[in-house]
Image: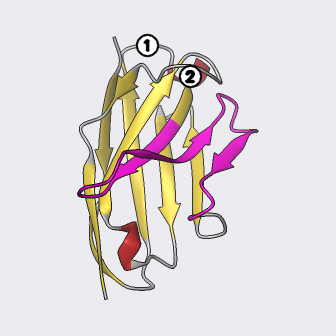
């Protein structure tokens, strides 16, 4: 069993920055692929960014490339999402998730943290 707890959400103005954190416990975090998802009201959940167990491979949604950066600290069992140049359309609940492989189903999810970008 894996527990994922997100933090760092809040309200920020257009163009501002936030850093989300996701603390993991319950198994060997360093072996897991991690991802950040978001879901805005009335929209489907989308993958924003993902990172391999070593941190050497990352992927981003086109909508956040160049603005968001995913990283991880395996010593702290934590994955981060640095969000810069935030836009109102980034407003959503952000979730972290983990899986054992680079493909397939995401097995574990956090409870989510709200990010609101005001114009």
Residue 5 seen in render: yes
Q: Which residue is mark 2?
A: 32
Circles 2, 1 touching at the beta carbon (< 8 Å)? yes
Residue 8 seen in render: no
- Please tell me which residue lies in front, 3 or 13: 13
The answer to which quarter of the image holds residue 88 is bottom left
- Please tell me which residue lies in front, 99 or 40: 40
Residue 58 position, x and y percent, is 69, 44
Q: Is residue 78 above or below residue 66?
A: above
Q: CA distance from mark 2 to mark 1?
A: 9 Å
Residue 50 position, x and y percent, is 58, 41
Q: Residue at x 60, y 18 (%)?
A: 31
Q: Give the SS element for disc 1.
A: loop
- Categorize mark 1 by other alpha carbons within 10 Å: few (<14), some (14-19), many (20+): few
Q: Is residue 28 left or right of residue 24?
A: right
Q: Which residues are magenta?
A: 35-63
Q: Is residue 50 above or below residue 61?
A: above
Residue 92 position, x and y percent, is 31, 60
Q: Which label lies toward us, 2 or 1? A: 2
User: Which quadrant of the rendered structure holds the N terminus?
Assistant: top left
User: Which quadrant of the rendered structure holds the C terminus?
Assistant: bottom left
Q: Residue at x 69, y 38 (%)?
A: 55
Disc on res. 27: 1
The coloring applied to the image is secondary structure
- Categorize mark 2 by other alpha carbons within 10 Å: few (<14), some (14-19), many (20+): some
Return the disc, 2 or 1, that comes first in the chain's sequence. Answer: 1
């Amino acid at each position: 069993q894996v527990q994922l707890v997100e933090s760092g959400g809040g309200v920020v103005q257009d163009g501002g920055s936030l850093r989300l954190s996701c603390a993991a416990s319950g198994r060997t975090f360093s072996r897991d692929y991690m991802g950040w998802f978001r879901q805005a009201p009335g929209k489907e959940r989308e993958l924003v960014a993902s990172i391999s167990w070593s941190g050497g491979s990352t992927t981003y949604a086109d909508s956040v490339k160049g603005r968001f950066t995913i990283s991880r600290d395996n010593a702290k069992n934590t994955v981060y999402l640095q969000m810069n140049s935030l836009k109102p359309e980034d407003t959503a609940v952000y979730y972290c998730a983990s899986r054992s492989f680079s493909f397939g189903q995401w097995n574990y999810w956090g409870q989510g943290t709200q990010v609101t970008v005001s114009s």
